[in-house]
Amino acid sequence: MNLIKSLVLGSAAGLVALSGAQAADLPVKAKAVEYVRICSLYGAGFFYIPGTDTCIKLGGYLRVDTTFNGNVYGGPAWSGDLGQGNRYRDYFASRSRMALTVDTRTATEYGVVRTFGQADFQFNNFGSSNPSVLTSGSNPLHTPGGGYVAVEMAFIQFAGFTFGKSASAYATPWNGYPGNNNSFLMGGPDYVTGVNNIQYTAQFGNGVSASIGLDDPTVFSRTSVLNLNASGFATVGSNAYGGTHAPDIVGNIRVDQAWGVFQIAGMAHLVNASYNNLTGAAPNNLSEISGHPEDKWGGAVTAALQIKNLPTGAGDDIKIDATYSHGATKAVVSTSSTSPSFVMFGDTGVAGGYQSIGFGQTADGVYRPGFTDGIKLVDAWGIRGAFNHNWDPYWSTSLWGSYGQVRYGGSATDLTSARGAWCAVYTAGKAVSADYACNPDFNFAQVGLTTRWTPVKNLTFSAEVGAFFLDQKMQGSAILTPAAPKPTAIYEFKDQSTVFLNVRAQRNF
């Protein structure tokens, strides 16, 4: 009986185990797969974010470029070790960058809500080998495995408004790139890397629009307010800009037609200093009671023109813009980064002279501590442009150039003028030649040629050669003490020039 009972129980247990195994093998109904849907509302490359009504586009590029006899990305040898031509200079500079862009659009009852961001992952051999420039730990980004991330754009657009880091309403349609590859074509404004702003754009139809905005000038729009408290071999005073007291007020009127684009833009910029009594650029315990010059409003205006459908070939065009500034020199002496000042050395024919020197100090205004004549604003104007020609679907060439002037105003003998105040400080204590004449004004000119080859779509190889010319207005010679390793010696004031070659490969995606 016990044997029969064991067999029955064992058989039942087996059946239960078998039925459980079969149940485990039964198919389970899977969740529906939500496939990515193409979004054709905003052009190629957009798709819907799964589960939302928001369209997104991922893009960017990878770029590798090398500049010979210049700084990264086509920077001319116009200052520092490169301008000196000393043994610490780099004969070439390279940079690798991967830019990633994220563009989202959502249709609403108020129009499209858009967000856009661009991050640049970069590595380059920027920096200096000069021990007087490079201090311990000050240049960690070009070490093996180094690099950095730069934010170019990050903004929201809604109902005609733009909030965030974007191109200013004062920018030209092409920023500082009418046809050049390099980031250093001056003569007009360049907001290609974006500036924090709030702006509104109204569309009037038939290609006519207008924009008005407020820009943060802290990082982008300022050059220097020179407190004329000391003299160097190529500079006078120190930058004494105060805190940010007002945004730049900017705006434009633009016409887009089949024949091209025309835009006129304006900017109001507040020039404000900190204190009269400064030790170099640093405050001291007497600065606050020493007073300060009154703030002054300056500004700039730019006219830009693009002409399309030229008879020279399909896709050919001409882009040109002209700018005048008063106390807003960054609108003319511009790059995609800061406004440069220039210090360049060359040969000399002066008896007993060591070398020649040409310099141009960039400033928005100057003032004399303890005097009541206030800030004297610096004037500048410039013009730049390019002719762009397509030889065939694979080859294209751009001929580009610029010209500009910076003027301090007044005469060297008028101490109430910008030029006179500057020269009084610069000349004091210097041993100068009999034919010496002081004038901080300077002109600049640039010219270059860029040729591109696109063997397959979105892959371009290019070469660019460019020249920079500094027309400085100082005359004669003087005993100067430049930055090391230059010696204290007789230097002739003389115009200078330099050339560079940049080669680049870029893959867009």
Image: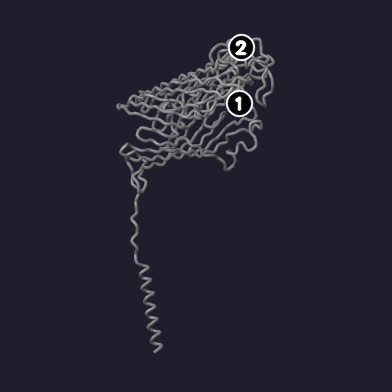
Q: Is residue 401 visible?
A: no
Nearer the viewer's eye, disc 2 or disc 1?
1
Q: Residue 281 shows which numbered tag?
A: 1
**Which quarter of the figure is the C terminus placed in?**
top left
| Disc 2 target residue | 437
Between 382 and 194, the one lying in front of the other is: 194
Q: How many marks?
A: 2
Say which quarter of the image contains residue 5: bottom left
Q: Residue furthest bottom?
A: 1
Q: Earlier in the sequence, mark 2 or mark 1?
A: 1
Residue 45 to residue 189: above or below? below
Residue 443 place in picture, x, y as percent:
53, 18
Residue 181 place in picture, x, y as percent:
47, 30
Residue 261 place in picture, x, y as percent:
36, 25
Residue 153 place in picture, x, y as percent:
45, 35
Going by the numbered disc 1, the residue's amino acid type is Ala
Q: Residue 196 shows which numbered tag?
A: none
Secondary structure under badge 2?
loop
Say which quarter of the image contains residue 428: top right
Going by the numbered disc 2, the residue's amino acid type is Ala
Secondary structure under badge 1?
loop
Q: Residue furthest front?
A: 289
